[in-house]
C-alpha cells in the first residue's frame, strides 16, 4: 500500500497547489509593465487589455515544441484562447513550459495583440506572485 499512499500525497499536494493559486488569483495580481513596449490600449469589441494573468486550462500542441495555442482563465473567471505568435522571449519562456503551468496551476502573464477576433501572444512570463502579508 505504500504506492497508494504516495499517490494520495501527490494528489493532496496538487490540490493544495490548485487552491493556493486560485486564492492568489482571487486576491488580485500585482502590476506589471510590458516587456519592451507600452501596454496596449483596450481594444474594441470587449477584448481584454494586454497583459493578462491567469491559469492555463488547456494547451493545443503537436508535441512539446509544437504549441500553437492555449486557453487561460483569469482571476475574474474569464476564459480566453490565445494563439502563439512570434515570441520575443522563447528562450526564457519556451512554449512547452505552458504544459507545466497547466499541471501546477501557477499563473502566467500573457502579452498579446488583437488581430480581428484572435488574441496573438508575443511575450510570456511567470505571473508575479503576491507576497504574503
Image (cartoon, rainbow, N blue to C red):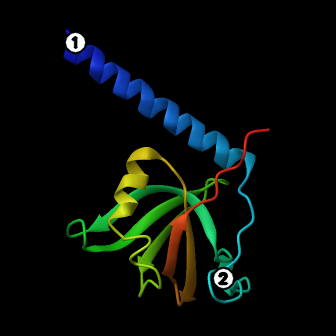
Which residue, given by chain and number where applicable, does mark 1 sit on? Answer: 2
- Asked if 10 appears above or below 106 in the picture, the reply is above
Q: Examine the image and state in which quarter residue 11 appears.
A: top left
Q: Residues within 10 Å of mark 2 (few under 14, many from 20)?
A: few
Query: CB under 8 Å between callouts 2 and 1?
Result: no
- Left or right: 13 as drawn, with respect to 66: right
Relative depth, front residue between 47 and 21: 21
Taking the spot 73% from the left edge, 40% from the top edge, the residue there is 132
**Mark drawn on residue 25:** none
Image quadrant of residue 44? Answer: bottom right
Instruction: Determine whether 130 is above or below 78 in the image.
Output: above
Image position of 102 with respect to 96: above or below = above
Indicate the secondary structure of the residue bearing disc 2. Answer: helix
**Residue 79 in the image, given as x and y percentages of width and height:** 54, 60
The residue shown at (40%, 67%) is: 70
Residue 78 placed where, x, y %? 60, 59
Image quarter hosting the N terminus = top left
Disc nearest the viewer among 2 and 1: 1
Judging by the rendered image, the residue that carries numbered circle 2 is: 45
Amino acid at each position: 500500500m505504500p504506492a497508494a499512499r504516495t499517490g494520495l500525497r501527490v494528489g493532496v499536494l496538487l490540490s493544495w497547489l490548485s487552491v493556493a493559486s486560485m486564492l492568489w488569483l482571487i486576491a488580485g495580481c500585482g502590476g506589471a509593465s510590458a516587456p519592451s513596449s507600452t501596454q496596449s490600449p483596450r481594444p474594441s469589441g470587449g477584448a481584454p487589455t494586454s497583459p493578462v494573468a491567469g491559469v492555463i486550462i488547456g494547451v493545443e500542441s503537436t508535441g512539446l515544441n509544437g504549441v500553437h495555442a492555449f486557453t487561460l482563465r483569469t482571476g475574474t473567471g474569464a476564459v480566453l484562447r490565445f494563439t502563439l505568435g512570434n515570441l520575443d522571449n522563447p528562450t526564457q519562456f519556451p512554449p512547452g513550459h505552458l504544459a507545466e503551468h497547466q499541471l501546477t496551476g501557477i499563473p502566467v502573464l500573457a502579452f498579446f495583440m488583437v488581430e480581428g477576433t484572435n488574441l496573438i501572444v508575443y511575450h510570456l512570463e511567470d505571473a508575479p506572485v503576491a507576497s504574503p502579508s
